[in-house]
């Protein structure tokens, strides 16, 4: 997080220095800041993993968007077809996420992914209960969700 | 369009007063909410409405386009909304307290102070 | 004169402190010195001058804008009354100091008594009609306080109210009459009004005359307002003697005499006086004759006298006015004495019932002797002044017409009867069984009657003592160009003397016929309670209370929904009526037709509102209101009001949150209304809705002037230094609105906070 | 072309509003209605965006931001309420 | 299948109450609260030029605090405020009143706006009595809503 | 021109998704399934519109605002969905009879996973006060 | 430009805000309240003197020229009302020192009281229609707060009606403002007067006028719109009742006076005839309502209504003398009615009840209190030489001169019935022996000077107006002339612009 903050700060500084408040100039400033942080990462521990995490985050974002659209289409088809195709149920998933923030992000991403909705976390924060709409293959749903979690955690950690 | 809005004003006023004529205090307070919206809509509509030309001065040219919406009714409505909110908050709590004290939500039962 | 009044007022104000102090020394009677001094002063300073035909007028401004001046006028008429008030007042105070010895709150009694005296003095000397009215009302209220002096008795309170109600009611009519007279005559100064007879005629003048007479009649207990006076006898006897015989009840008479020079020639004025006076005379005399309570009998006899005085004014000839003055003096002297003596009997024997009293001659010889003199004066027998007065009345009647003579004789014979009964019943005959052992009355209680009756005797024997001075001057005041006249006890054998003899004989016959009839009294009471004017009064009072309760029950029925219905209709009917009759159905404004999206937006607004109204589920209703709020925001945004849109969205969200928070513990929707009520309410609601729609349409059609908004648009950036014009209006152009608005919020917060947190038993 | 698209979009979003409103009316449970209201809020955000494109007034976006930040409070509030009182309306 | 609710009732009624705070909601609220607050200040400051202003900003901030209330409960909210909401309210009102006064010093009418414009690090900064007034409005709105919410929220229902 | 086409496509897609979300909300059988329709499609549609706005204006501040809107929606929407879904679930809003599994219910009541009824308990929620009372016994 | 014009509002607002910020300290709240009451009174006197000297005092808030900004304007009527507000506020502040429970103070009593006065002052001073709405709302909400402070059942019951009906009135008022702006494009009263002169569609102007009339009629407690008043005025603390009775309805009356003498003067025949009958019916229903009551404060509440009728009649006759009478009546009524309510509080404190049937013995035990009651009571009934007599006299005289016989007749009748009610209180509370009750109360208990002082002061004012009413008459005369000649007002407000 600190790394991202610095990156934004650097981009802002760039924009101020150049005096051009165009959108592309912000993007450019951000890129330059990223490079700078990349160079710094070896010596400054606070930002040491930031350069690694940014591409992962972007990659995850793309993956997430893809999933979002795919699953949205799946639901869309279900909506258009007159019969309800779903086979809903509440399943439990063992969480690898540990901190509150991680758990929350995982749960929210799952909620945003069509077909699944986070209902609750167990008191010991080890199990996430998810309402899934298409439980034709329960193991596959579980596996997909675990996969999503893993990718997210990679960005986080 | 103003004609449609005028009809809408009528519907809101009718709904509000109908609700205020109910004996259930919760309905009464709902009526108050609708009533304030109705009055605001009167101010908004009666001055005439304009689509797509908000009363903002352009950042660069420091001018406005011709025929922009009248800012004054907007300011009035804004003030009225805020006031109505304060009044409403008060009324909502009032009906709850009245309900607690009287033990009933029928305004006809709340007649101990009249005669 | 103002000084006179001030002295008495001061005395009144001091009484509550002074009286207990004097009472502790047994010297309350010393208070009588004050009116006595005033009497002597008036007698010595004013009388000679007035007798010479002089008048005194002193004017100070009070409220010049209203024509109200502090002007006091002394001529024969007012001086006569001043002398009566202070003179009789002296003895009344003396009398009361003993009679009231054992009453509580004696200080307050004298407070009101002196206050009354001051008001009465003011009334008779005022030269300004409005000033006169001020004193008039003051006599009413002080008399109320005195009648209700035994205020812990419900009856006293009730009867005091009656007196007040009748006199103040009449007072209000008088006030209106005064206003009219003032505007007709162009001045309120009496001395200017009475300069010449009022020339004006017409219905407005007639209304004025009636109104003034109403005021006078109520005050002076003329039929049909006579009933309050006997009831006022609930007051302690000194009060009855002073107010209800000698002074206050003569205020109406005084007023009529005062205005006589200006109004006496109005036909309506004199006719009404004749009729009211005549009826009152006879009625009072009959009632006095049938009364079995001494004070009642005296009261009705007073009514008779008042009627006679009015009657004489109605005749209006010089003879009548001379008779008027004579009778006025005579009556004041003997009636005050009679009341004081009756009080002495009551005080001593503990009863006022003529049928129970008897044989007091032995125990109360002095009282008996005085009573004989007083009663003879009442009966109009020589050599008392009462005789002269009665002769004058007969002469006046004879000079007028024969019908009036009949009235006069009837009155006189009944008076004779009453007078004789008053001598016989309490004093002669066998000893009666009395509530307490009688004893002779004390000196202070007898000195008043003694002096007053001596005066009566003196004036009767030597009428010259008064006729050239006081009476002449008084007559002059009532009839400005009166010819000279002389009074004498012996006129020779003439018709008047014959009538006197006739009256005496008839009176004696009536005494023979008198029975202390409870049955008659009962009938009389029943009569007055069912059909008489008094019954009218009580029925009126009952009706007022009945109407009040009925009206309150119907109007203030405690049902909010009914209140709202009435109020909504109070908007719809006048506004709608005016719109349709004076403006007509508004045309449809020429504006752009809506597109589909706009229609959908408004449809969402309408539908969500309607759903919020019809759903039986409370939270569905709240949520629907949320949707309504969003729809309104959409409309605001679509029509170029982003600030409104934001505010609406935020307020709607917070409103819903608030409702959720508050209604966690509030009731659900209950439906109490029957189908009919729902339809009725729906009609009312729809009427208002239609009206508002029409109004908006009507307003859209006209633009009487260009909007002031152009100024904001032009100057927002230059002068307001902001580009968001709405916000500049809110915080700069019209910042005061916003200042008020934040205080509204703060008050709402305080209100909510206290309502939730401050409860019974919480702390 | 964009005008046509915008009109189409206005109409379809209005349709969506109507459908969501029907769910709000039908319920059957309180959460169903809350969900419908949330969807209405989403549609309204979309409409604000559309208005911005339609009129070229970017100020309308600010309303969208505000709505995005606060509309969900209604859901949170009702969620809390449902926990306390249950989902049954009346 | 049996009705879910019946099963729920039959099984264990109190499970909701054993566990009535959602971890997800709490964590999210902690993220959202500062976002909303910052945004509210943003709305306040730019209100003179774009949609926004003290009232709107105040409402957003109040929304933020009400989220906190709904999530963490009344006690936590009270802990969050180191001053009473009523103090905020009073300060807001006083600021609103104070903003009307400075113009008197220059002999102008009450409420006449005074502006102080200068450049700070290349940006034009506009300080004015109008801004003070707007801040007063902002604080009043927050104070009002928080006074109301803290009064209304029953500690039994809205606790941490 | 290209941008206009992209904007148009985005808007059309957004409209379609929004309508679908609304239809789903209307036709799906129970609350959780309805929420699947609204939360996701609704969010997606809104985001698409916002992206279209950003592309249409192509200005820094507007893009920033669009990013802010999208971020806010992505943060708040799932939280709201979660809060409602969870509350509704525990409040006993009925699930569709076709629901195949309920591991959450099992988790809280492992002792009677078969769905048998315990007759000795139902009276506990006859009054709201009980619910408040039990709040105090939170572990 | 006269900044003093904003001071009455400013002082009360500041007092309200300061007492709010001192919510922890009862003592400081009391100090602030007293201080601001005194300062307000001084300012009010200065303002009145200034207005008498200059005719009109105008302040353009924020230096924005009329009709664009909000104009504060005081003519003699406004300044008189401000002074009366100061007097009532001062009396209520004194009375509250000892009579209001600490709990109430802790929960904002003094803030609400002062903000109420701020709202009232704003309503009297503003020259802007919408701003009037804002001050109305400030006043209303503060009165809501005061009405419910204490949270007892009857307060809540009364408040529900009070709030609902008044909010409806506000909605009508607001809609009328919207329509007025939509048609004239302005909000400034003087500017409205200019723009409404000679418009073609006088019918539509009358429609708008009637909407305002109904709305103000509700606030003023006119027939048939007064239901809220008797339902609620007897429920709060006595000091609050007193302020309500003295000031709140008079704000409605004031607004009627202002609107129908400055703005809606195009069809006086129509509008003022309606006001006349409104006034007559108001008088009658009010006085009859009082006759049916046996509770001290309820009788007084209904009499507010009946007296409002007088004020309306006076205004409806619309001659100089009639308006003088109206202004005189308002001034007299505010002082007297406030006092009567305060006295009812003292009797309540001693007897523990407001029910006439359960009271009695005050004349014997508390003669001075009886005297202090008699003064305002007889004044209310219009007996000379107290203030009420002159008020009534002027109105009746104006009615006679204008030939409004209905008004005169009913005015007299109502005067008599008012006396009946006052005498009822007098006979029951003061004359009657104290009834035996379960919990005997000590009528001779010591009373705080804080409570007695305002009562005596107000009574003395009543006597003073009676004995020396000329200055007030002169004041009312100037006020009436100003009201009948709105051009002066218009010139003062709009002068110097355009
Ligand atoms: Na899905
Ligand atoms: Na128009």
Image (cartoon, coloured by chain):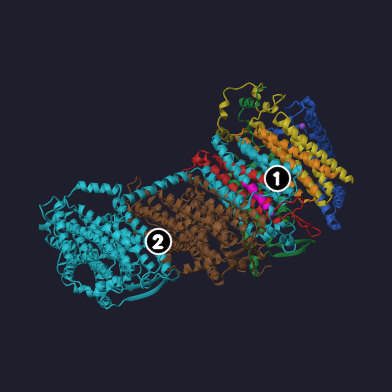
Q: Tell me the orange chain.
A: D
* Residue labelled 2 has its Cβ within 8 Å of some atom of ligand 2: no
**From mark 2 to mark 1, how far is it between C-alphas?**
60 Å
Residue G296 appears in the picture as rendered: yes
* Shown colour of chain G: brown
**For residue C417, above or below residue C325:** above
Q: Is residue C693 magenta?
A: yes
Labelled disc at residue B4: 1
Q: Say which element carries label 2.
A: helix
Q: Which chain is home to disc 2? A: C
* Shown colour of chain F: yellow
Residue C284 lies, in percent from the top left, at 25, 56
In the image, are marks 2 and 1 on the same chain? no
Region in magenta: C691-700
Badge nearest the viewer, 2 or 1: 2
Q: Nearer the viewer, residue B78 or C507?
A: C507
Can you tell which quarter of the image residue C46 is in? bottom left
Task: Determine the quadrant in which ligand 2 lies.
Answer: bottom right
Q: Is G419 situated left or right of D57 in this image?
A: left
- Dominant SS of magenta comes to helix
* Shown colour of chain B: red
Q: Is C452 situated left or right of B18 in this image?
A: left
Mark 1 nearby-residue class (10 Å; few <14, some 14–19, many ≥20)? some
Residue hosting label 2: C207
Q: Nearer the viewer, residue G109 or B92?
A: B92
| Residue at 19% over, 74% down | C464
* Shown colour of chain C: cyan
Quadrant containing the C terminus of chain F in the rendered view: top right
Residue A32 lies, in percent from the top left, at 87, 50
* Shown colour of chain A: blue
* Residue labelled 1 has its Cβ within 8 Å of some atom of ligand 2: no
């Amino acid at each position: 997080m600190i790394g991202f903050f610095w990156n934004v700060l650097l981009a802002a500084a760039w924009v101020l220095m150049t005096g051009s408040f165009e959108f592309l100039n912000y993007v450019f400033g951000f890129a330059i800041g990223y490079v700078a942080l990349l160079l710094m990462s070896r010596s400054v521990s606070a930002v040491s993993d930031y350069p690694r995490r940014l591409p992962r985050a972007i990659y995850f974002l793309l993956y997430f968007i893809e999933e979002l659209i795919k699953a949205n289409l799946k639901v869309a088809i279900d909506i258009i077809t007159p019969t309800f195709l779903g086979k809903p149920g509440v399943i439990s998933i063992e969480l690898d996420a540990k901190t509150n923030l991680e758990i929350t992000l995982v749960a929210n991403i799952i909620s945003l992914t069509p077909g699944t909705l986070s209902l609750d976390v167990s008191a010991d924060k080890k199990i996430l209960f998810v309402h899934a709409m298409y439980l034709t293959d329960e193991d596959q749903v579980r596996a997909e969700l675990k996969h999503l979690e893993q990718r997210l955690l990679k960005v986080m950690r | 369009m103003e004609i449609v809005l005028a009809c809408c004003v009528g519907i809101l006023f009718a709904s509000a007063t109908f609700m205020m004529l109910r004996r259930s205090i919760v309905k009464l307070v709902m009526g108050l909410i609708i009533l304030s919206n109705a009055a605001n809509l009167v101010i908004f509509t009666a001055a005439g409405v304009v689509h797509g030309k908000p009363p903002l001065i352009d950042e660069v040219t420091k001018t406005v386009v011709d025929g922009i919406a009248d800012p004054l009714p907007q300011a009035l409505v804004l003030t009225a909304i805020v006031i109505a909110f304060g009044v409403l908050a008060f009324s909502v709590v009032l009906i709850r307290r009245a309900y607690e004290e009287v033990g009933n939500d029928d305004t006809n039962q709340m007649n101990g102070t009249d005669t | 004169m103002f000084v006179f009044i001030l002295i008495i007022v001061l005395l009144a104000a001091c009484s509550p402190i002074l009286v207990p102090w004097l009472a502790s020394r047994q010297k309350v009677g010393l208070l009588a010195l004050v009116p006595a001094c005033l009497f002597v002063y008036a007698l010595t300073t004013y009388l000679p001058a007035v007798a010479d035909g002089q008048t005194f007028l002193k004017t100070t401004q009070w409220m010049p804008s209203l024509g109200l001046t502090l002007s006091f006028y002394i001529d024969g008429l007012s001086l006569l009354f001043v002398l009566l008030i202070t003179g009789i007042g002296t003895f009344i105070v003396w009398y009361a100091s003993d009679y009231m010895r054992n009453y509580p709150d004696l200080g307050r009694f004298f407070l009101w008594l002196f206050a009354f005296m001051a008001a009465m003095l003011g009334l008779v000397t005022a030269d300004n009609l409005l000033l006169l009215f001020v004193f008039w009302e003051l006599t009413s209220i002080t008399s109320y306080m005195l009648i209700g002096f035994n205020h812990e008795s419900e009856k006293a309170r009730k009867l005091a109210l009656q007196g007040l109600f009748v006199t103040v009611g009449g007072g209000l009519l008088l006030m209106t009459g005064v206003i009219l007279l003032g505007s007709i005559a162009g001045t309120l100064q009496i001395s200017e009004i009475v300069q010449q007879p009022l020339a004006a005629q017409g219905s407005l003048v007639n209304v004025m005359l009636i109104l003034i007479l109403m005021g006078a009649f109520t005050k002076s207990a003329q039929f049909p307002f006579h009933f309050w006076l006997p009831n006022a006898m609930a007051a302690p006897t000194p009060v009855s003697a002073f107010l209800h015989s000698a002074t206050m009840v003569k205020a109406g008479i005084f007023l009529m005499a005062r205005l006589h020079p200006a109004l006496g020639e109005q036909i309506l004025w004199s006719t009404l006086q004749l009729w009211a006076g005549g009826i009152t005379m006879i009625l009072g005399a009959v009632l006095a004759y049938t009364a079995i309570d001494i004070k009642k009998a005296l009261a009705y006899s007073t009514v008779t006298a008042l009627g006679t005085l009015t009657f004489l004014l109605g005749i209006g000839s010089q003879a009548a006015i001379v008779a008027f003055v004579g009778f006025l003096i005579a009556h004041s002297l003997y009636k005050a004495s009679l009341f004081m003596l009756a009080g002495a009997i009551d005080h001593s024997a503990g009863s006022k019932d003529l049928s129970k009293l008897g044989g007091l001659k032995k125990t109360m010889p002095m009282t008996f002797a005085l009573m004989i003199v007083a009663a003879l004066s009442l009966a109009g027998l020589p050599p008392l002044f009462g005789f002269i007065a009665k002769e004058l009345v007969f002469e006046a009647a004879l000079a007028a017409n024969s019908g009036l003579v009949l009235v006069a004789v009837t009155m006189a014979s009944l008076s004779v009867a009453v007078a004789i009964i008053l001598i016989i019943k309490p004093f002669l005959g066998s000893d009666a069984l009395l509530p307490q052992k009688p004893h002779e009355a004390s000196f202070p209680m007898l000195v008043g009657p003694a002096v007053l009756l001596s005066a009566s005797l003196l004036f009767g024997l030597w009428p010259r003592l008064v006729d050239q001075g006081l009476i002449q001057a008084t007559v002059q005041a009532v009839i400005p160009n009166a010819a000279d006249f002389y009074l004498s006890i012996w006129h020779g054998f003439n018709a008047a003397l014959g009538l006197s003899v006739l009256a005496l004989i008839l009176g004696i016959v009536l005494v023979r016929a008198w029975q202390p009839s409870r049955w008659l009294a009962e009938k009389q009471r029943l009569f007055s309670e069912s059909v008489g004017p008094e019954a009218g009064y009580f029925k009126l009072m009952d009706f007022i209370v009945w109407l009040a309760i009925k009206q309150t029950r119907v109007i203030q029925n405690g049902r909010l929904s009914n209140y709202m219905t009435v109020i909504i209709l109070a908007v719809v009917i006048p506004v709608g009526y005016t719109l349709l009759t004076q403006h007509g159905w508004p045309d449809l404004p020429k504006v752009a037709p809506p597109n589909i999206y706009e229609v959908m937006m408004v449809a969402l607004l309408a539908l969500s509102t309607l759903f919020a109204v019809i759903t039986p589920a409370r939270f569905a209703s709240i949520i629907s209101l949320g949707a309504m709020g969003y729809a309104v925001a959409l409309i605001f945004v679509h029509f170029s009001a982003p600030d409104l849109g934001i505010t609406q969205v935020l307020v709607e969200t917070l409103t819903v949150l608030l409702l959720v928070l508050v209604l966690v513990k509030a009731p659900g929707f209950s439906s109490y209304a029957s189908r009919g009520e729902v339809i009725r309410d729906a009609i009312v609601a729809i009427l208002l809705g239609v009206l508002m729609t029409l109004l908006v349409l009507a307003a859209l059609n006209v633009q009487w002037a260009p909007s002031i908004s152009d100024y904001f648009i032009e100057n927002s950036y230059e002068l307001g230094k902001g580009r968001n014009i709405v916000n500049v209006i809110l915080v700069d152009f019209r910042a005061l609105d916003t200042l008020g608005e934040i205080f509204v919020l703060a008050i709402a917060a305080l209100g909510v906070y206290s309502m939730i947190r401050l409860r019974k038993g919480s702390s | 072309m964009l005008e046509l698209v915008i009109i189409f979009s206005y109409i379809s979003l209005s349709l969506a509003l109507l459908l969501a409103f029907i769910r709000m009316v039908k319920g059957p449970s309180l959460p169903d209605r809350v969900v419908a209201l949330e969807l209405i809020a989403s549609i309204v955000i979309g409409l604000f965006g559309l208005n911005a494109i339609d009129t070229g007034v970017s100020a309308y976006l600010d309303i969208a931001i505000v709505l995005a930040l606060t509309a969900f409070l209604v859901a949170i509030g009702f969620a809390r309420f449902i926990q306390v009182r249950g989902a049954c309306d009346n | 299948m049996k009705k879910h609710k019946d099963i729920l009732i039959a099984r264990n009624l109190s499970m909701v109450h054993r566990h009535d705070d959602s971890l997800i909601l709490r964590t999210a609220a902690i993220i959202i609260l500062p976002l909303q607050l910052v945004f509210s200040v943003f709305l306040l400051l730019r209100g003179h030029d774009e949609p926004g202003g003290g009232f709107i900003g105040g409402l957003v901030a109040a929304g933020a605090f009400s989220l906190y209330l709904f999530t963490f409960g009344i006690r936590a909210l009270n802990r969050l405020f180191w001053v009473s909401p009523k103090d905020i309210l009073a300060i807001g009102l006083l600021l609103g009143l104070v903003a009307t006064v400075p113009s008197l010093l220059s002999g102008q009418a009450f409420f006449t706006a005074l502006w102080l414009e200068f450049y700070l690090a290349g940006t034009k900064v506009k300080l004015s009595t109008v801004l003070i007034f707007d801040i007063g409005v902002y604080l009043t709105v927050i104070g009002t809503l928080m006074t109301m919410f803290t009064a209304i929220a029953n500690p039994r229902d809205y606790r941490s | 021109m290209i941008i206009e086409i992209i904007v148009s496509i985005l808007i059309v897609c957004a409209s379609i998704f929004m309508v679908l979300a609304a239809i789903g909300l209307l036709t799906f059988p129970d609350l959780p399934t309805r929420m699947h329709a609204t939360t996701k499609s609704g969010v997606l549609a809104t985001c698409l519109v916002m992206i279209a706005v950003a592309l249409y204006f192509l200005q820094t501040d507007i893009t920033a605002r669009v990013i802010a809107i999208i971020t806010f929606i992505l943060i708040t929407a799932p939280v709201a969905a979660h809060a409602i879904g969870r509350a509704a679930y525990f409040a006993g809003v009925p699930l569709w009879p076709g629901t195949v599994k309920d591991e959450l219910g099992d988790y809280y009541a492992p002792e009677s996973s078969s769905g048998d009824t315990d007759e000795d308990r139902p009276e506990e929620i006859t009054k709201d006060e009980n619910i408040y009372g039990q709040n105090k016994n939170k572990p | 430009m006269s900044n003093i014009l904003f001071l009455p509002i400013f002082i009360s607002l500041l007092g309200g805000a300061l007492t709010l910020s001192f919510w922890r300290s009862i003592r400081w709240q009391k100090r602030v309240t007293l201080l601001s009451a005194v300062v307000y009174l001084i300012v009010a006197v200065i303002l009145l003197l200034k207005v008498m000297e200059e005719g009109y005092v105008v302040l353009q808030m924020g230096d924005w020229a009329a009709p664009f900004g909000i104009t504060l304007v005081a003519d003699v009527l406004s300044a008189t009302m401000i002074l009366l507000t100061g007097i009532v506020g001062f009396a209520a502040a004194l009375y509250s020192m000892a009579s209001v429970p600490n709990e109430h103070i802790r929960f904002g009593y003094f803030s609400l009281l002062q903000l109420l006065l701020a709202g009232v002052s704003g309503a009297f001073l503003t020259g802007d229609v919408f701003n009037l709405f804002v001050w109305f709302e400030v006043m209303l909400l503060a009165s809501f707060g005061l009405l419910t402070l204490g949270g007892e059942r009857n307060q809540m019951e009364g408040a529900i009606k009070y709030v609902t009906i008044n909010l409806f009135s506000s909605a009508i008022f607001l809609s009328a403002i919207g329509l007025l702006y939509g048609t004239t494009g302005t909000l400034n009263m003087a500017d409205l007067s200019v723009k409404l002169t000679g418009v073609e569609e006088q019918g539509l102007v009358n429609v708008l006028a009637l909407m305002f009339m109904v709305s103000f009629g509700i606030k003023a407690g006119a027939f048939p719109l007064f239901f809220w008043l008797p339902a609620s005025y007897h429920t709060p603390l006595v000091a609050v009742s007193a302020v309500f009775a003295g000031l709140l309805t008079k704000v409605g009356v004031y607004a009627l006076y202002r609107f129908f003498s400055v703005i809606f003067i195009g069809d006086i025949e129509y509008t003022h005839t309606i006001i006349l009958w409104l006034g007559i019916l108001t008088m009658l229903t009010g006085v009859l309502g009082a006759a049916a009551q046996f509770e001290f404060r309820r009788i007084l509440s209904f009499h507010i209504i009946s007296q409002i009728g007088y004020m309306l009649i006076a205004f409806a006759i619309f001659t100089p003398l009639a308006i003088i009478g109206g202004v005189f009546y308002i001034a007299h009524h505010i002082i007297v009615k406030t006092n009567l309510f305060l006295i009812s509080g003292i009797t309540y404190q001693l007897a523990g009840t407001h029910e006439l049937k359960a009271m009695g013995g005050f004349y014997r035990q508390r003669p001075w209190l009886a005297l202090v009651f008699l003064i305002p009571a007889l004044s209310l009934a219009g007996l000379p030489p107290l203030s009420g007599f002159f008020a009534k006299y002027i109105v009746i005289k104006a009615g006679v001169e204008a030939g409004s016989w209905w008004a005169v007749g009913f005015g007299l009748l109502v005067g008599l019935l008012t006396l009946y009610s006052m005498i009822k209180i007098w006979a029951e509370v003061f004359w009657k022996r104290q009834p035996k009750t379960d919990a005997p109360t000590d009528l001779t208990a010591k009373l705080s000077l804080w409570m007695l002082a305002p009562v005596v002061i107000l009574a003395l004012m009543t006597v003073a107006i009676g004995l020396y009413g000329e200055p007030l008459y002169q004041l009312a005369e100037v006020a009436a002339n100003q009201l009948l000649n709105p051009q002066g007002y218009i010139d003062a407000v709009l002068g110097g612009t355009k």
